[in-house]
Image (tube, rainbow, N blue to C red):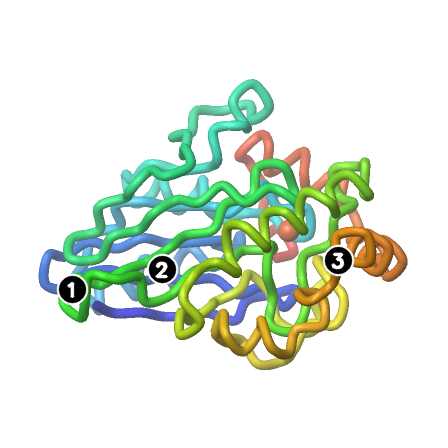
Amino acid sequence: MFFRQRPAANATLSYFFGCASLQKAVAVDVVAGDENWFIEEAEKAGVRIVHVVDTHVHADHFSGGPALARRAGAPYCLHESNQGRVGFGFTPLVDGQRLDVGNVLVDVVHTPGHTPDSVCLLVRDLRRGSEPWFVITGDTLFVGAVGRPDLAGQERAMAAQLHDTLQTKLLTLPPELEIYPGHQAGSACGAGLSGKPASTIGFEKRFNPMLSMSKEAFVDALTAGIPAQPADMASIVAANLRGVVPEAAPA
Ligand SMILES: [Fe+2]
């Protein structure tokens, strides 16, 4: 497989990976203005972009996903809970669904908590083994931190849901599994993120302070330390729900 992690604006981490031999690729959490980079990387790797995924409707940056999907002729994918909320056609993702990216298989895991529509992507490379190799965690689990729970309102209920999601859907994965988060230090989407852009489930389980708390302590700690909301959040979310971002959007 090939794999690229792109540090983008607003401390966002985007991903582009896939199967060079069967010439298929998936783009994840594309920031507006970065579309050309994905097109150029696809040309370099000799692959076709077959899926463009946003792990959730972003509140901190304009998504480049819909524009890249249109240019690549690929489906733009969001969790199915966005049906009726997003004002343009997208391909709904359901929990447990598998995306075929050649010898690379991508399983969708619904992981509500940061937002109700958050998904993580569990990735295996059949050329290396039948077990998952890494998980793209979006804003659900960061290196050293977890996603903020307040962007959709009801922050205590969302924090409790995030605790359940983390404990039952991510921390049950094998300890050697790599995690690739949606942000690194400097992001408004969480507090206390490491500047290191990758980790493993096992290391986070041992050393991420948010992962060893009772649900009650987790909810108290997470809702006590909420950072300021991203600037222009309402207009960013509105644009991402329309699928049309302003010209030369500040990425
Ligand atoms: Fe987010």
Left or right of 163? Residue 6 is left
**In the picture shown, does residue 12 fall above or below 159?**
below
- Which residue position is annotated with label 2? 38
Please give the name of the residue rendered at 63% of the width and 80% of the height, measured from the top-left corner. Answer: 195
Looking at the rendered structure, which numbered label has been put on residue 214?
3
Residue 15: quadrant of the picture? bottom left
Foreground: disc 1 or disc 2: 1
Please give the name of the residue rendered at 37% of the width and 55% of the height, measured from the top-left corner. Answer: 122
* Residue 6 picture location, percent across and down: 46, 69
Residue 17: quadrant of the picture? bottom left
Left or right of 1? Residue 207 is right
Image quarter in which the C terminus is found: bottom right
Looking at the rendered structure, which numbered label has been put on residue 20?
1
Left or right of 28? Residue 130 is left
Q: Secondary structure at mark 3?
A: loop
- Does ligand 1 reach within 8 Å of label 3's beta carbon? no
- Give the Cα separation between the discs numbered 1 and 2: 15 Å
Q: Secondary structure at mark 2?
A: helix
